[in-house]
Image (cartoon, rainbow, N blue to C red):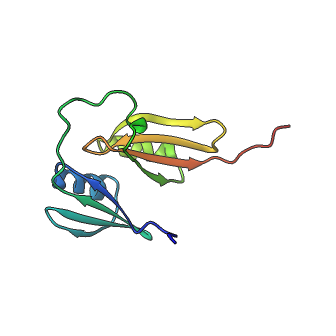
Amino acid sequence: MFTQIDYTMVVVSDMQASVEFYRDKLGIPLKFQSPDWTEFQTGATTLALHGGGVVGTTPPTGDPTKHAGSCSIGFNVNDVDKTYEELKAKGIRFVMPPTQREGEGIKLAVGLDPDGLPIAFAQTIPQTAAG
């Protein structure tokens, strides 16, 4: 019945800051922008930003990638160490530096968007056969 996600929507508290993050820092092509709804083209799926989000009154605690009822966005990259250094130089805050994920076949880094949404960057690492 459902074969493909059409769009992913992120509710944001500051549309301009979020557009600058996704367009200018991550380099995602802008498809359409308005004060309340913005779209980026990311292949077959659209990344949409919905304005009007309310910033939480209490600071989040714990690992932001583990909050129930939340989500994160993930990108595959060719070189996670290079991506990490380039994005860090653009001011993106990371909660996980490039880390080899044992048994998962990836090296992963996790940054945060302006509202604290985790953005993962994963590089596939070839698995070696146990000898």
State the residue lying farthest toward the front. 1
The one of 73 and 54 positioned closer to us in this rendering: 54
Residue 89, given in percent of the width and then of the height, sits at 33, 42
The one of 102 and 79 positioned closer to us in this rendering: 102
Residue 51, given in percent of the width and then of the height, sits at 18, 56
- Is residue 35 shown left or right of residue 65? left
The one of 79 and 52 positioned closer to us in this rendering: 52
So how many labels did they put on this image? Answer: 0
Q: Quadrant of the C terminus?
A: top right
Res. 62 image quadrant:
top left
Res. 8 image quadrant:
bottom left
Residue depicted at x 64% and y 44%: 105
Question: Considering only vertical position in the picture, is 18 above or below 61?
Answer: below
- Is residue 79 shown left or right of residue 131? left
Residue depicted at x 22% and y 58%: 50
Residue depicted at x 24% and y 29%: 59
Residue 47, given in percent of the width and then of the height, sits at 34, 62
Res. 65 image quadrant:
top left
State the residue lying farthest toward the right. 131
Residue 76, given in percent of the width and then of the height, sits at 51, 54
Residue depicted at x 38% and y 37%: 67
Question: Considering only vertical position in the picture, is 8 above or below 123?
Answer: below
- Is residue 111 shown left or right of residue 30? right
